[in-house]
Image (cartoon, helix red, strand yellow):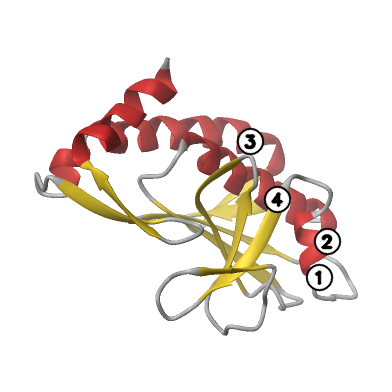
Amino acid sequence: MALEISVRNSRLFKKPLSISEIIGNDNWSYGTLDEHARLAKGSLESGGPLIVYDNDCICRGIQVIGADSSKEIHLALNLPAADRDVKMIFELAAKIARLWKSNHILIEGDKTDLSETEASMEFNRKANLSLLRNSRELFNAQEYVTIFGAMLPICVPIDQLESFGDEAES
């Protein structure tokens, strides 16, 4: 399960964005995943998926598809995720939209004005917290779950994963 957001370039003269334009001055970093789902920080060379993550809260990270495209960039966040990741995907989408002079983004294929992204973000945050609290059902009552994080896969006890939903809500 994933949250997916696309941004289309509205400029007359379309040009791709550089990774430094995408992450800007925020406390974000990037890297690509190798064949073992380990992050090569600051690299665009491994050929794996490009991941952007927050240095202050390294969780799952945002997968950026088509970062070298001049027409559309697709963002994906595997769920359940940390609350910070849900906020970050919306911040990243809005930043790309502003750079491309677009007034809207596509959330799960639905066109959403930038002025409405706050409400969409809140809806998705609540849905994500519900997924976290119901992780036992989501992952078929396994004792441990492997979550693919921004840096590497981690094995998390299901009880701890469920508690993240309660902690983020308080």
Q: Which residue is mark 1?
A: 18
Q: Which residue is mark 4?
A: 28
Q: Residue at x 30, y 32 (%)?
A: 130
Q: Amino acid at mark 2?
A: Glu
Nearest to the eye among marks 1 and 3: give it.
1
| Earlier-in-chain disc, 2 versus 3 | 2
Label 4 secondary element: strand
Q: Are marks 1 and 2 in contact (CB under 8 Å)?
A: yes
Nearest to the eye among marks 2 and 4: give it.
4
Toward the viewer: 64 or 101?
64
Q: Which residue is mark 3?
A: 116
- In this rendering, the answer to whether 144 lies above or below 22 is above
- In this rendering, the answer to whether 150 lies above or below 114 is below
Q: Residues within 10 Å of mark 3 (few under 14, many from 20)?
A: few
Residue extending furthest right?
Answer: 13
Q: Where is residue 88 drawn, in percent x and y? A: 61, 44
Label 2 secondary element: helix
| Earlier-in-chain disc, 1 versus 4 | 1
Q: Are marks 2 and 4 in contact (CB under 8 Å)?
A: no
Rounded to the nearest angstrom, the CA distance separating label 1 from label 4 is 14 Å
Q: Residues within 10 Å of mark 2 (few under 14, many from 20)?
A: few
Q: Is residue 134 left or right of residue 151?
A: left
Q: Which residue is mark 2?
A: 21
Q: Amino acid at mark 3?
A: Glu
What is the quadrant of the N terminus in the image?
bottom left
Rounded to the nearest angstrom, the CA distance separating label 1 from label 3 is 26 Å
Q: Are marks 1 and 3 in contact (CB under 8 Å)?
A: no
Q: Is residue 133 left or right of residue 165?
A: left
Q: Where is residue 63 drawn, in percent x and y? A: 54, 63
